[in-house]
Amino acid sequence: MNRIDLQAAALRCSTGVARIPTARGARRLLLAAAIGASLAGPLQAQDGALGASAQGLLDYARTQSADVAAMRQEADAAAQRQVSAGALADPVLRVELMNINNYGSDAPASVLPWQVGETQYRLMQALPGWGKRDLRQGVAAADAAQASARTGATWAEIAARIKVTYADYYRTVGSERLTREVIDLMSRLEKIAQVRYAGGLAAQQDAIRAQLEQTAMRSELIGLENDKRQLRARLNALLARDWAAPLAEPQVLRPLPDLAASDAAQLADRARSRNPLLQAEQARLAGAQKNRELTFANRYPDWLLGVQSTQVGSRLTSYGLMLEVNLPLQQESRRAQEREAEAMVGAAQSRTEALASQLLGDLAANLAAFDGARRTETLVETQLLPQSELSLRSALAAYENGKVDFATVLDAQRQIRKARLDRLRAQTDAQMRLAEIERILGEDL
């Protein structure tokens, strides 16, 4: 017979004993070694440790992120400024001691109110022109809304980076797992090739090629392990943890929503109304408009009201009222301020329109890429992987009959490995695109 039992062949490498197999048994054993694990899907999450799922990382970051905490505190500070912006200025009390040397009398000089010629008490309150308090409060409210929106934008950015990094981490770990499986497969094929060479059924070059493949995979494994360490450090930095803090290996990807390119218009409307960066720019525009109104209101004067009382000796002898008005006569400087306010409104409008155009363009691009990744995954899952499996079965059967060389088996194995990598890449690409879409929308789908 020109076929040997592969299991016995592998055993012979360690015991020196070989047995004659059936052809069906040889094909079954080699197929189990080559594609049994290759077609298995990713492990499902059973571990609740930090790092096993993207949601766990997001929940941790929401409460621990220093950047988000800082933005929340700034938003609280901006909210408090609304109260002070609409408040009146503190009143001013003025005390004037007149004739402290007591000229014209025999009394000595003094600084006591009842021992000088006369003392004047004046209480004054500044009053802004009509409507200016409301406008100042409107500017402060717009600043508070902008700070609040920037808090949401900061969180959306951090969440997107966590989701993208987690997907990259998942792909790296999956590639590492696949590479170890290939190394194990090549080790088995090397033993089989050595047994076939010993039986005069194959060339020694088959075993050497299996060894070369293992070396290449080990070199790739070194790079993947390095990438995994870098991604762990990056995730820990996003979580405000020590860069060397332990993280569990990712076990499952987030479920993907049912999105298609035809949903672009609906998602664009959601982005216009909910994107935090766009909301921040709209708040800035509102603040610029209120500031413009306030600048034009400064054409009209502010007021200063006061009451006055005069003390002579120990008695209050007279009372008075005071009205002070500033005269807005510096027209050139005021017109310059008004032109500045107009320019700031125009800049805010242009900035808002530019950001909206950029966000909607990014949304359409990411939605198209998301759709492409989903279609690629479906194609690989339904066609490329079954075709690669069929190719490997055919190559193994032909190799057993001596009709093809070992290189054909290696090519078939590489095809099925590439198909698995393509599926993994399509899955994680879809996750990354989804993270960008959610960042633009400002909410999870």
Image (cartoon, rainbow, N blue to C red):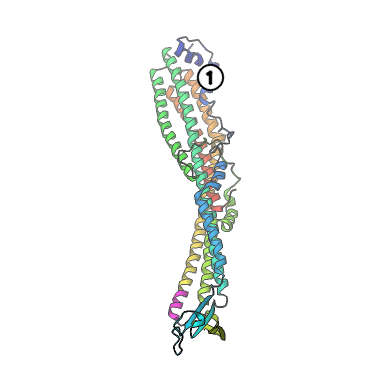
On screen, 22 above or below 426? above
**Dot 1: what SS?**
helix
**Along the line of sight, the residue nearer the viewer: 362 or 102:** 102
Q: Seen from this angle, which residue lies furthest bottom?
A: 104
Q: Amino acid at mark 1?
A: Leu
User: Badge 1 local density, few (<14 within 10 Å), some, or many (20+)?
Assistant: some
Up the image or down, 315 lies above or below 249; here it is below
The image shows residue 104, relative to residue 233, as above or below, that is below
- The x, y position of residue 258, in whole percent, is 61, 45
Residue 360 shows up from this direction: no
Q: Whole-percent x and y of residue 15?
A: 46, 10
Magenta residues, dominant SS class: helix
Question: Horizontal placement of 75 versus 244: left or right?
Answer: right
How far across and down, in percent of the image, does residue 83 sit? 57, 66
Give the answer, above or below, for where 231 lies relative to 125. Answer: above
Res. 394 visible in picture: yes
Query: Magenta stretch?
Result: 327-338
Give the residue pinned by disc 1.
29
- Name the residue nearer the viewer: 207 or 326: 326
